[in-house]
Every structure is written in C-alpha cells, then in structure tokens.
Image (tube, rainbow, N blue to C red):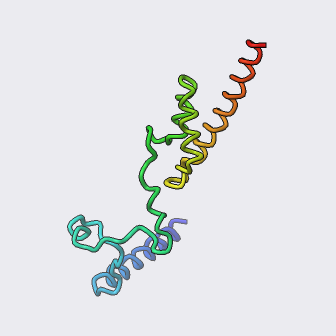
Amino acid sequence: MLITCYKDLRKLASFQQIYLDKVAKGILVNTGHSTNAVENRQSEYILIRDAEEPRLGMFDKPLPCFGCGIGWFSLLLGFVCPLMWYFATILYFGRYYHKDPRERSGLAACAIAATICTIAAVIALLVILL
C-alpha cells in the first residue's frame, strides 16, 4: 500500500515537472482574460445590446415605484384610495405597457380591480336607493 502511494506521488511530481517545463518554454500560456485592472481599462468595451433586437438592453433598468412598477404599486395603493385603480386603468387602455411590457400585468390587475370596484359600487347604490 505504501509503495503504491509513493509511486503515485512520483507520477504526480513528474507531471508537475512536465507542466512547469512547458510553461517555462512558453508552450502553455494563459490566453484568457486578464484580471489586472490596468489591462482591462485599456481594452475595448464590448457592446452588450444585440444588433438584431434593439429592445434587449431596455429592461436592464429597474421598474419605477420601488421596483414593482406603476401597475402593482397602484394596485396596492388602490386599497387606500380606489381612484388609483382608475388611473392605472386609463394607463392600461392608453397602452402605456408598450413603453415597458413588464408593466402590463400590474396595469391589467388594476383594470380588473377597478371593474370589481365599479360593480360593487353600482350594487351598493342599487341596494341603498331601492
């Protein structure tokens, strides 16, 4: 057992020596990117956006209203002031979500909430008046 471990260590040492010899001769050279900040500063920048899809880099910035978007923020705020649901519904039907498609679900939720609120108000008025 001890002899096989010794032989394995000798093989490892010989592989290490071969590797160091190749590095010294320049055969194995790291061709990857440098981690040196000075070299990176002098290199050229790479364009992140795709030439075929110009809207790809559009969604790198966070949504407004604490990152949840106008629609979801209006939905939450609408429980305090239901007029916010109607404001977001106007934005939804005005196709505001074409500026940022991530807003569509929140604005649609506000439109549904405004519809439910309107139906509840009409039913309440009918019950009170009749």
Which residue is rendered at x = 23% and y = 67% of the image?
A: 41
Q: In the figure, is residue 120 to the left or right of 49?
A: right
Q: Residue at x 71, y 18 (%)?
A: 125
The extreme front residue here reads 129
110 displayed left or right of 41: right
Give x and y (percent) for residue 35.
Answer: 29, 66
Q: To which quarter of the image does residue 118 belong?
A: top right
Q: Position of residue 1 (x, y in %)?
A: 55, 66
Number of marks in the rendered image: 0
Residue 94 on image: x %, y %: 55, 48
Q: Residue furthest right?
A: 130
In the figure, residue 75 lies in which quadrant? top right
Query: Would residue 25 be found to the left or right of residue 74 on screen?
Result: left
12 or 64: which is nearer to us? 64
> Which of the pair 34/64 is nearer the observer?
64
Quadrant where the C terminus lies? Answer: top right
Q: Considering depth in this image, is 48 or 27 the residue closer to the camera?
A: 48
Determine which quarter of the picture holds residue 89: top right
48 w.r.t. 20: above or below: above
37 to 101, vertically: above or below: below
Residue 54 in the image: x percent, y percent?
46, 68
Placement of 108 over or under 36, stated as above or below: above
Q: Residue at position x 51%, y 35% from top? A: 73
Closer to us: 46 or 80: 80
Examine the rendered structure and indicate whether residue 48 appears above or below residue 98: below
